[in-house]
Image: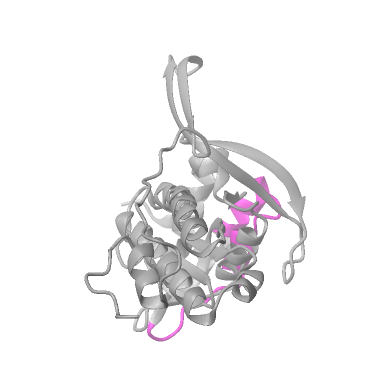
Amino acid sequence: MRSERDGVARAQGPTSIDVLLDRAVRAINSGDRAVATALAGQVLAVDRGNTEAEDLLLAYPGDGGEIRRLTMLFADLVDSTALSTRLEPEAYRLLVCRYRQQVQQAVDRYGGYIASTKGDGLLAVFGHPVAHEDDVRRAVQTGLEITRDLRSLSERAEHQFGVGIDVRVGVHRGPVYLDIAHDDVYGLAANVAARVCGLAPPGSVVVSDGVEPLIAGVFELERRAPSAVKGVDAPISHYRVVGECAARRSSGRTRVSRLCKSSFQGHEHARYVLGRAHHGTDDAWAEFSGVAPLVRKAV
């Protein structure tokens, strides 16, 4: 049986680096600090400044938890403070509630779970408690679906309340401390996901440079200028997800055909038939949710 040390020697390309980082995490959780350090060192030898490898050099599992490399999605409403000033408190609450429900539904569909909610920002984790080989792709696909769903929700909000809403989504992957007993995650990577989200233009999904090489063949990406963010020393390299791509290649080199479907074009949103726009809050919420009230209060 090969030991982890047998896999230290080679690190060629993003896939091999990803494998080495996974091996380093396993070594840390098994208590083999020497192997973990060697593996992280090999990554840094070919990818100087790799933040995951640098974090793993200092990572130690604690009681009741372990180090994991997880994919994290952070979704946040755009200009929520300004939105709250334009709506009655109850209408604002109902709108934010519906937004959270749509994010939750999208995350559930792709096998993630909501790890925390702070205001109108939600952190979703992919890779725990159930791990999939394509958790990174699932997270990005979830982000695209959230932006599509919010455009439809915004149309209804415009019709019912006279205001629209928008969302930003950021996706990042990195090592975190996973508190297994409470399903909580701790570490810089979770904070970076929120910072990456803040770099996204309204209505779009942005991924970090740690995610980009893992999805480059699945999604069409647009490189954006590195940006400084609060709490992170170096500027963050990031990419906007333009849309999903299907590609076929011949002999591994020649591109035969490529069909890209933009996530920002060609989508038909379901339109809801809403009643009159001047009902009370209960009726407005029923109509906004697509459910007509059965009985109206007597005037």
Residue at far front of view:
299
Colour theme: one colour
Residue 201 placed where, x, y %?
Answer: 65, 51
Quick one: quadrant of the C terminus? bottom left
x then y, percent, for residue 284: 40, 69
Query: Foreground residue, 19 or 278?
Result: 278
Q: Is residue 67 visible?
A: no
Give the x, y percent position of residue 43: 60, 51
Per the image, is 53 magenta? yes
Q: Which residues are magenta?
A: 39-64
Above or below, 85 against 99 in this view is below
Query: What x and y, as percent, mark residue 182?
Result: 37, 83
> Is residue 262 left or right of 237 when viewed as pictured?
left
Residue 188 visible in the current orientation = yes
88 or 151, nearer to the observer: 88
- The relative height of residue 14 versus residue 22 in the rendered view (above or below) is above
Q: Which residue is outermost to the left? A: 294
Please identify the quarter of the rendering in which residue 164 is found.
bottom right
Q: Would residue 182 be found to the left or right of residue 36 on screen? A: left
Residue ID at (46%, 48%): 148
Q: How many marks?
A: 0
| Picture quadrant of residue 115 | bottom left
Main secondary structure along the magenta-highlighted residues: helix
Residue farthest to the bottom, as pictured: 63
Residue drawn at point x = 45 percent, y = 16 percent = 257
Q: Work out whether residue 40 or residue 183 is closer to the camera in this orientation and state it.
A: 183
Asked if the stretch drawn in magenta spans residue 95, the answer is no
Residue at 45% x, 56% y: name it: 156
